[in-house]
Image (spheres, grey):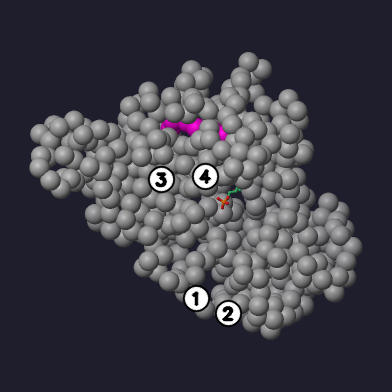
């Protein structure tokens, strides 16, 4: 069940073991999120964090590392020194080489003394997932434990299956927590509330009333020092296979019977399995692959992808994808879902745009027949809002229609601080709530759907289209929608 409680989780204590304890993710996301939970009184008093990494440090050396490297990533930097000190008191450090099974005995000794549920968080490269799981099992640490796997979980269907098979020999599916941090975002949670807590939208949420749906996750940032990793990954694997397809599955899913983990994940899976497989000619026509060239973001010049450190000068890795997907079921047959994501675009925005059909006949002129005049825009970030666009009569003589909207900005209603995605997901993992983690069959279905695109792009004749930084991607992305008599939201305004 998704949980609303704000009290300490896992009152019986826990040991949260963080592999990759000196890594980028630990520094930027995981330790700041644990600190936020600690400061809010949401961690059981006897919960312990044990960081594991190869770097030879003693406990106090690691504390110093945390102090120097983690503090700057805490929003509003900790001013509350007592809370920060008591957070540090929770943390221990074990230095070991995770590729050496023998080294895990020292971890077992450290954990032996700690009570409560064990959670192993693998914030390492995926090549270490299986060796770590096997080593944990060999020293008797896997039983009853939970394992949290960061993305990327594999590189394609075959490699993700290989990891899932090997991890699955040691842990049962309900011990495995696969992270997709988009599922922890407040705004994504709100999609469930919007769709399944209101009767207003449900009758319209289908092919009879919806013309097309757009899902955009646009970033202004480039590859930010991750060139090496990104160049072997690309936007399709980094964003579409996971975050965008998860958003699509929540937008398109049937109302679940309950918010129980398997009820929700089962409905998402049905959508992912209903995605129409893409044929080679559809990939050529309906999937746009772009890469950024030099340009400017908000007036500041930024370099081309090729010039980023760690990127091969002749790389064809995509930094932008736009595509048309279709869900083959009674609710959605014939409704295009346009997905788009990219780096170095004109703005940072994540939003879902539901374009309703126009009136069947307009007695009020052609304006009422213009596509997109009735639409629901659900903005997930940077600010969270819902906007319902409609037509209204302009004051004065004559019947002139103009676009107006009803606007719901969530920060006007809710003054509470928003919980960061990682904080929510870590608390869920500690408490044993699986609903916001990706089940193996969901992940497999998503890889299976993107596989033909991966294959097509691996062919030597497949080209990547350039776009200038600070734009909305290659012109082909606009042409894709124009062929369906629609356009991206920023082109509608
Ligand atoms: C990550 C990707 O999963 O999501 C990054 O690896 C991307 O490349 C990030 O920048 C975007 O997340 P958010 O929460 O900033 O939208």
Q: Residues within 10 Å of mark 2 (few under 14, many from 20)?
A: some
Q: Is residue 58 visible?
A: yes
Residue 219: percent from the left, percent from the top? 56, 44
What segment is highlighted magenta in the picture? 319-325
Outermost residue, bottom side:
82
Q: CA distance from mark 1 to mark 4?
A: 34 Å
For marks 2 and 4, give the CA distance. 36 Å
- Residue at image point 26% right, 48% down: 404
Q: Is residue 351 above or below residue 476?
A: below
Q: Quadrant of residue 109?
A: bottom right
Tell me which label, 1 or 3, sits earlier in the chain.
1
Task: Tell me the element at label 1.
Answer: loop
Instruction: Identify the secondary structure beneath mark 2.
Output: loop
Q: Nearer the viewer, mark 1 or mark 4?
A: 4
Residue designated by label 2: 41
- The picture places residue 266, in percent across and down from the top left corner, at 43, 49
415, above or below 353, in the image: below
Q: CA distance from mark 2 to mark 3?
A: 34 Å
Tell me the residue that label 3 is attached to.
Answer: 352
Residue ID for mark 4:
347
- Of labels 3 and 4, earlier in sequence is 4
Which residue matches tag 1? Answer: 6
In this rendering, the label closer to the viewer, 3 or 4? 4
Q: What numbered label is drawn on residue 109?
A: none
**Pointers 2 and 4 in contact (C-beta within 8 Å):** no
Q: CA distance from mark 1 to mark 3?
A: 29 Å
Task: Kindly state the secondary structure of the residue where label 4 is placed.
Answer: loop
Quadrant location, the C terminus:
top left
Tag count in the figure? 4
């Amino acid at each position: 069940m998704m949980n609303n409680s704000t009290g300490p989780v896992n009152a019986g204590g826990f040991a949260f073991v963080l592999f990759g304890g000196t890594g980028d993710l630990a520094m930027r996301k995981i330790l700041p999120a644990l600190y936020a939970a600690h400061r809010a009184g949401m961690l059981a008093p006897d919960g312990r964090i044990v960081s594991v990494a190869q770097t030879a440090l003693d406990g106090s050396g690691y504390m110093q590392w945390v102090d120097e490297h983690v503090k700057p990533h805490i929003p509003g930097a900790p001013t509350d020194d007592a809370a920060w000190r008591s957070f540090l008191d929770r943390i221990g450090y074990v230095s070991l080489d995770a590729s050496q099974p023998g080294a895990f005995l020292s971890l077992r000794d450290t954990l032996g003394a700690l009570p409560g549920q064990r959670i192993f968080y693998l914030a390492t490269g995926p090549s270490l997932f299986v060796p770590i799981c096997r080593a944990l099992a060999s020293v008797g640490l896997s039983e009853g434990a939970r394992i949290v796997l960061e993305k990327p979980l594999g590189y394609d269907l075959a490699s993700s299956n290989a990891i899932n098979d090997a991890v699955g020999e040691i842990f049962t599916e309900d011990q495995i927590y696969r992270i997709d941090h988009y599922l922890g975002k407040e705004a994504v949670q709100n999609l469930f509330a919007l769709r399944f807590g209101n009767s207003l939208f449900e009758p319209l949420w289908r092919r009879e009333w919806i013309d097309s749906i757009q899902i955009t996750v646009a970033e202004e940032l480039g590859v930010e020092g991750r060139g090496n990793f990104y160049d072997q990954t690309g936007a399709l694997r980094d964003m579409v296979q996971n975050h965008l397809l998860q958003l699509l599955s929540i937008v398109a899913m049937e109302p679940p019977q309950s918010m129980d983990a398997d009820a929700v994940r089962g409905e998402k899976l049905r959508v992912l399995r209903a995605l129409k497989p893409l044929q080679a000619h559809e990939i050529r026509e309906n999937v746009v692959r772009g890469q950024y060239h030099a340009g400017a973001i908000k007036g500041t010049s930024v370099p081309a992808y090729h010039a980023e450190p760690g990127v091969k000068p002749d790389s064809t890795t995509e930094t932008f994808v736009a595509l048309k997907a279709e869900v083959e079921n009674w609710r959605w047959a014939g409704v295009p879902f346009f997905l788009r994501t990219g780096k170095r675009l004109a703005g940072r925005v994540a939003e879902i745009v539901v374009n309703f059909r126009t009136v069947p006949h307009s007695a009020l002129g052609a304006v009422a027949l213009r596509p997109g005049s009735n639409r629901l825009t659900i903005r997930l970030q940077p600010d969270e809002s819902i906007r319902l666009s409609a037509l209204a009569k302009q004051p004065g003589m004559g019947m002139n229609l103009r676009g107006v909207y009803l606007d719901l900005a969530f920060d006007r209603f809710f003054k509470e601080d928003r919980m960061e995605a990682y904080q929510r997901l870590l608390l869920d993992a500690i408490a044993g709530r699986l609903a916001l983690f990706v089940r193996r069959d969901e992940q497999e279905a998503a890889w299976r759907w993107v596989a033909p695109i991966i294959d097509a792009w691996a062919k030597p004749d497949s080209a990547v289209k350039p776009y200038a930084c600070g734009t909305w991607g290659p012109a082909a992305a606009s042409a894709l929608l124009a062929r369906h008599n629609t356009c991206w939201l920023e082109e509608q305004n």
